[in-house]
Amino acid sequence: MHDIATHFKGQMESDPSGRFLVSLLSFTTDTVSIRYLIKFILLSTPALMIVLCSPFMGWASDIWGRRKLLIAALFLFAFSGMSGYFASTLTELFIGRLFLGMSIAAIKTLTVAMVGDYFTGKERDRFIGWQGSAMKFGGVLFLLLGGYLADIHWRIPFWGYALAFLALPGAIFSLYDPKKPDATTPSSASKAIALPISIPKVGFILISAFMASVLFFMTLVQIPFFIPERFAGSPGEVGFAIALANLAGAGIAVLFYRFKERLSFVTIFTLIFALMGLGYWLVSVTPNYPLLLAAMTIAGCGFGLIVPTQSAWMLSEVTGARRGFGIGLVTTAMFLGQFASPVLIEPFIDPEDPSSVFETAGIILFGLSITYAIISFFQKSKRDIAS
């Protein structure tokens, strides 16, 4: 990212998008540096587009079908991602990231919704877990590949988005839109869209997804500062700690269906918050780097259950005609949490004590775990009375 900032530094005032974004970002800081600008373009811009576009993508797929939209999104993902290699101006880079965010919104929403189209019951829970695991493994591999290619030249990692072309044959020849009267034709789908959903239940899912995302993403924001300040760790040690947490998450996500066989969704979120809380608290008190890795592994087990749990939970609460829209809302909640995390965590950061933010987050997570345990208890009691 340093090399990208150096390359585009001279365009902050001459490029139209550069001037616009500097003016926009000036409301958040007194001085907008080129590094801040590039971080916003490369990271925040796609996330913001995902937040805005995910419900629309899901709604559109409920009406017109998911397969063709997914194929188009894969093409858009590849070309918009690769556009960074050819970008010669900040405007070109910015537009490419806008379209990249749109494509990710579609891919993330449609692939989960299609799991709901194709599978039910335990088979759905098993596949959701594998999907969550693949996301974790893919994230780790993409980061490692990007880091390796960036050592050659800063433009080359943008070719990594071409990997989307490998998924296209499967999308074209293997996927299909189930022929359901309430989800395939515009006229019947429009009527289905009007069907009510349980706002309290869906709202609770979205709040849970948002809170989990805020507290998960703080790891990616704070660990790169915490390890060097606490242990004088290197960038490699930072990357290894984050990768280990994600690998632990990938492993536990595969077992999601086992958790679902025995526990309700609320109880699983109780476990998620407890594991994250324990991991974060241990991070705050650990005296050395090896024990930090153990703490990150514990927290990572909580991370790995977040996506499959919120996805399966939403799929269980919405009808087939509203499936895409429901998953789009979950995607928005998740990325809104990612977008808001640095802002919400900032008041708890003590520059004199880098461990304090993890201690505070651990306490908050333990509180959430207790709250969800109480809710789970009353839900179980209500079901027992009803039966």
Image (cartoon, helix red, strand yellow):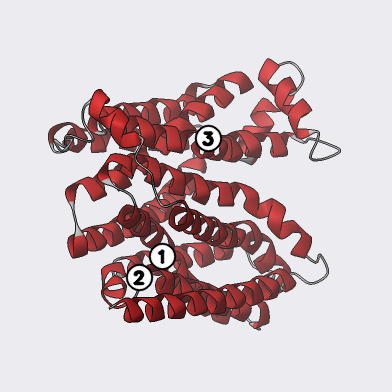
The residue located at (57%, 52%) in the rendering is 337
Looking at marks 2 and 1 on the same chain, the residue that comes earlier in the sequence is marked by: 2
The residue located at (44%, 52%) in the rendering is 144
Location of the N terminus (image quadrant): top right
Mark 2 residue type: Ile
Q: Residues within 10 Å of mark 1 (few under 14, many from 20)?
A: many
Instruction: Classify residue 111 as left or right of residue 357.
Output: left
Give how far across and how far down residue 305 sits, in percent: 40, 66
For the residues marked 1 and 3, what is the alpha-carbon distance in whole angstroms?
25 Å
Q: Is residue 68 visible?
A: no
Q: Which residue is mark 3?
A: 52
The residue located at (39%, 25%) in the rendering is 79
372 relative to 209, above or below: below
Location of the C terminus (image quadrant): bottom left
* Local secondary structure at mark 2: helix
For the residues marked 2 and 1, what is the alpha-carbon distance in whole angstroms?
6 Å
Looking at marks 1 and 3 on the same chain, the residue that comes earlier in the sequence is marked by: 3
Give how far across and how far down residue 196 sits, in percent: 38, 44
Circle 2/circle 1 CB separation < 8 Å: yes
Q: Nearer the viewer, mark 1 or mark 3?
A: 3
Give how far across and how far down residue 18 sits, in percent: 70, 23
Instruction: Classify residue 171 as left or right of residue 48.
Output: left
224 relative to 364, above or below: above
Mark 3 residue type: Leu
- The numbered disc on residue 312 is none
Q: Which residue is mark 2?
A: 252
Mark 1 residue type: Gly
Give how far across and how far down residue 258 sits, in percent: 26, 74
Q: Nearer the viewer, mark 2 or mark 3?
A: 3
Q: Which residue is mark 1?
A: 304
Residue sitting nearer the eye, 30 or 89: 30
